[in-house]
Amino acid sequence: MKKVNVVIIGIGNIGNLHINNILSGEIQGVELAGFCDINPEKLVTAKERYGENYKFYGNAEEVFKDSEVDAVIISTPHYDHPVLAIAALKAGKHALVEKPAGVYTKKVREMIEESQKHPELTLSLMYNQRMNPIYQKAKELVEAGEIGELRRTNWIITNWYRSQSYYNSGGWRATWAGEGGGVLLNQDPHQLDLWQWICGMPERVYSFAYYGKRREVEVETEVTAYVEYANGATGVFVTTTTETPGTNRFEIVGSQGKIVIEDEQLKFWRTVVDEAEWNETYTGGFGEPEVWEIKIPVTFDGESGHRKVTQNFVNNILNGEKLVSPAEDGIFGLSISNAIHLSSWLERWVDLPIDEDLFLAELNKRIATSQVKDTKEQILDTEGSY
Ligand SMILES: NC(=O)c1ccc[n+]([C@@H]2O[C@H](COP(=O)([O-])OP(=O)(O)OC[C@H]3O[C@@H](n4cnc5c(N)ncnc54)[C@H](O)[C@@H]3O)[C@@H](O)[C@H]2O)c1
């Protein structure tokens, strides 16, 4: 069977992870064809690391013109994700795009619209946590109605610790012009995506975000967001990059059950009857419905989510396997992220779907005063992150 010839665009931290994943031979049906980076030093390093037997491109346009290239993995900073994906599609290339789908929903919507014009091409996103069996199980439970009607969600995700040296490792990082956001846009896209993937989209948001708190950066390093869902359920999302030891605790409460994910474990409790029904009929004053703690099997196979998403992307190209993280899904988590920013900037409620033009106008105000950082770029070891 023909293999998919892929070029990695952006040979930084995560670009190197993609290269190693493909070179490990554990992804079937794919061939590494070459590397692309606008920083010539990155290409020199890639030659030293991986040898000369590849193609080296100084910009993405050269890749898109190359008829021997079938697909690209876009692992550049976020602003370029939808820009390069659109160009790739227009040039007839399949694309796997790193998270987040982009910085602002208006551009991501353009990317999705371009993708819809090319049904013969695959456009997938690297939401590798969708491959984590624990979140897959939570989604399965919620969708099967095992917790009853959704009532409250709560994600404390504060174990994204990042030191000042991390922020200093790239000029684009943590600036409005280079990155377009902080913890919400760099670290949290996984959780924001899973939150909506499992619990659905909220309908409005009120948030408090702190910019440059405890780090010398322009963007947010600490956020608390409160959301409301159409059915009256509420949610809270708490995040920071400056807390250690951090917490990663996701609680989903329904009218008939509760899921808690923490420390790589999923716990599940269910009341024998739905709380609303019990409340209507119970006359004893103090008292609560009977609760069962139920053991839910979650099987980990030790395989990396990145590799699985890449395999899924390749399989979709070769044999139409259903995409786990299709491009259309990229707008949801980003909408929540944009809504959280907008609410904190305007100090008011923000309804979803957001006013995309207003968001972009507010973002552009911040880009206009953004300072370019003079810093030496480094390739960091991504071991231990995801
Ligand atoms: N899925 C995950 O778990 C995960 C983990 C880390 C990073 N990421 C994402 O990957 C992206 C890159 O992050 P990173 O930490 O590797 O950044 P990085 O700065 O280490 O690497 C980015 C590379 O892209 C190159 N580049 C910039 N613009 C380019 C362009 N237009 N064409 C070609 N090359 C270009 C830069 O020179 C640099 O070498 C970010 O969007 C980040 O959110 C995802």
Image (tube, grey):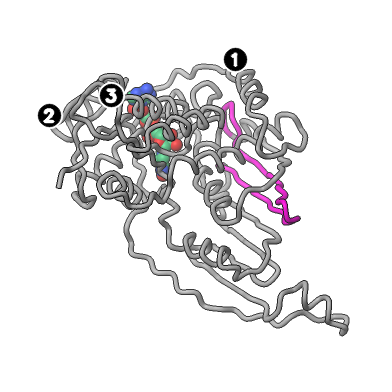
Q: Is residue 14 visible?
A: no
Q: Residues within 10 Å of mark 2 (few under 14, many from 20)?
A: few
Residue 39, x across and y down, in percent: 31, 20
Tag nearer the camera, 3 or 1: 3
Residue 333, x across and y down, in percent: 56, 43
Comparing 137 with 47, the one in front is 137
**Amino acid, disc 3:** Phe
Quadrant location, ligand no. 1 = top left
Q: What residue appears at the point 37 percent right and 52 percent down from the top-left corner?
A: 322
Residue 135, x across and y down, in percent: 49, 59
Label 2, secondary structure: give it.
Answer: loop
Q: Is residue 140 magenta-colored?
A: no
Circles 3 and 1, Cβ within 8 Å, touching? The answer is no
* Disc 3 from disc 1: Cα separation: 31 Å
Labelled disc at residue 204:
none
Corner quadrant of residue 198: bottom right
In this rendering, the answer to whether 326 lies above or below 37 is below
Label 1, secondary structure: give it.
Answer: helix
Q: Which residues are magenta?
A: 215-241
Q: Is residue 208 visible?
A: yes
Label 1: which residue?
Answer: 368
Corner quadrant of residue 95: top left
Label 3: which residue?
Answer: 64
Comparing 235 with 324, the one in front is 324
- Tag 3 or tag 2, which sits nearer the N-term? 2
Q: Is residue 232 magenta-colored?
A: yes
* Disc 1 from disc 2: Cα separation: 41 Å
Tag nearer the camera, 2 or 3: 3
Label 2: which residue?
Answer: 52
In this rendering, the answer to whether 284 lies above or below 238 is below
